[in-house]
């Protein structure tokens, strides 16, 4: 029987939400990541749907030996206080995506496919290295081999995209008459660059790679380009003083819902964001 495990990003310590929690509680980021591992591991073991009825922030703070940790998790959008039919408790946001058997099976499947792609790539490189100068094969034969290799690679990517799409919930309504199309990724790429204050015409290879990776994640969710500035405005409010980055937006997307921020603002007396602050959105 395999040991229990949970998913955690290798760059989690660099997440602005982690940095914000560390700053608020006087901890270093490693101490925050360690406590997150403990909390998420507890939810994975004790909950089947992300809810923990009867559990309070007082208990959670004691569990990780850090007063205020639960409240900071709520501010980051990772854990929320909930109530149902007279019962109070806590909910781990994104539980269905990251925890539970189905989420872990998707992660394992993606890992197996990545290993298989690497194995095929290595095998192709070894064949090229051991090949002769080409005198034993005609040019037509070599071209056919290359075509078959490219075609099979496209088939594998198509299978992975279909499988990933099947595991995702239907995309939310896009609004403003926007439809999903081939140019969605380019529009979201531009919207992310603008939200981060980056000049799309003067990007380094590293910056372009970060934008592409974030845009790919958002396209998979069915996000419209018009939603990016709205979520960026919430990011600036929630993580005041932190620099907006593509990974920061994509990595905290579910916690940057403008409606959720408005509810928080109305409950604690803070000013809600204006349309101008959210990129002119209604």
Image (tube, rainbow, N blue to C red):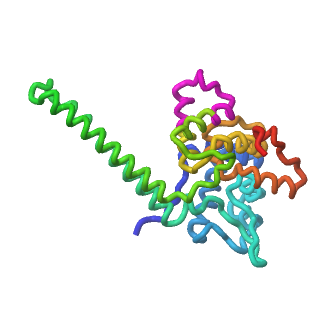
Residue lying at the far left of the rendered structure: 136
Q: Is residue 153 left or right of residue 190?
A: left
The x and y percentages for residue 212 are 53, 36
Q: Which residues are magenta?
A: 191-212
The x and y percentages for residue 42 are 60, 65
Q: Is residue 135 left or right of residue 59?
A: left
Q: Quadrant of residue 82?
A: bottom right
87 or 43, which lies in front? 87
Q: Quadrant of residue 237?
A: top right
The x and y percentages for residue 281 are 76, 43
146 or 72, which lies in front? 146
Question: Image point 72% across, 51% down: which residue?
Answer: 257
The x and y percentages for residue 8 are 55, 52
Residue lying at the far front of the rendered structure: 177
Question: Image point 37% across, 53% down: which residue?
Answer: 112
Image quarter where the N terminus lies is bottom left
Magenta residue check for 211: yes
SS assignment for the magenta stretch, majority: helix
Question: Image point 42% across, 66% down: which residue?
Answer: 2
Residue lying at the far bottom of the rendered structure: 85
Residue lying at the far right of the rendered structure: 269
For the image, the number of numbered tags is 0
């Amino acid at each position: 029987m395999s040991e229990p495990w949970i998913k955690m990003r290798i760059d989690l310590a660099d997440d602005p939400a982690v940095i914000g929690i560390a700053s608020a509680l006087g901890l270093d980021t490693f101490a925050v990541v360690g406590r997150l591992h403990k909390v998420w591991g507890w939810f994975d073991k004790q909950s089947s749907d992300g809810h923990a009825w009867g559990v309070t922030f007082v208990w959670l703070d004691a569990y990780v030996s850090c007063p205020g940790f639960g409240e900071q998790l709520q501010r980051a959008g990772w854990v929320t206080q909930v109530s149902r039919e007279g019962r109070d408790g806590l909910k781990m946001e994104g539980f269905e995506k990251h925890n539970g058997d189905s989420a872990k099976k998707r992660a394992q499947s993606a890992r197996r496919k990545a290993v298989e792609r690497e194995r095929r790539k290595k095998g192709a490189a070894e064949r090229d290295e051991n090949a002769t100068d080409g005198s034993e094969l005609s040019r037509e034969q070599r071209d056919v081999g290359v075509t078959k290799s490219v075609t099979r690679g496209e088939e594998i990517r198509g299978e992975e995209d279909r499988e990933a799409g099947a595991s995702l919930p239907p995309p939310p309504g896009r609004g403003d008459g926007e439809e999903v199309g081939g140019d969605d990724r380019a529009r979201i790429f531009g919207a992310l660059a603008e939200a981060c204050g980056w000049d799309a015409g003067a990007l380094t290879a590293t910056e372009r790679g970060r934008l592409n990776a974030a845009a790919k994640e958002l396209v998979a969710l069915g996000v419209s380009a018009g939603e990016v500035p709205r979520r960026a405005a919430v990011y600036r409010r929630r993580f005041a003083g932190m620099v907006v980055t593509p990974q920061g937006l994509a990595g905290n997307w579910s916690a940057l819902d403008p409606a959720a921020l408005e509810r928080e603002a109305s409950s604690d007396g803070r000013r809600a964001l204006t349309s101008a602050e959210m990129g002119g959105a209604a």
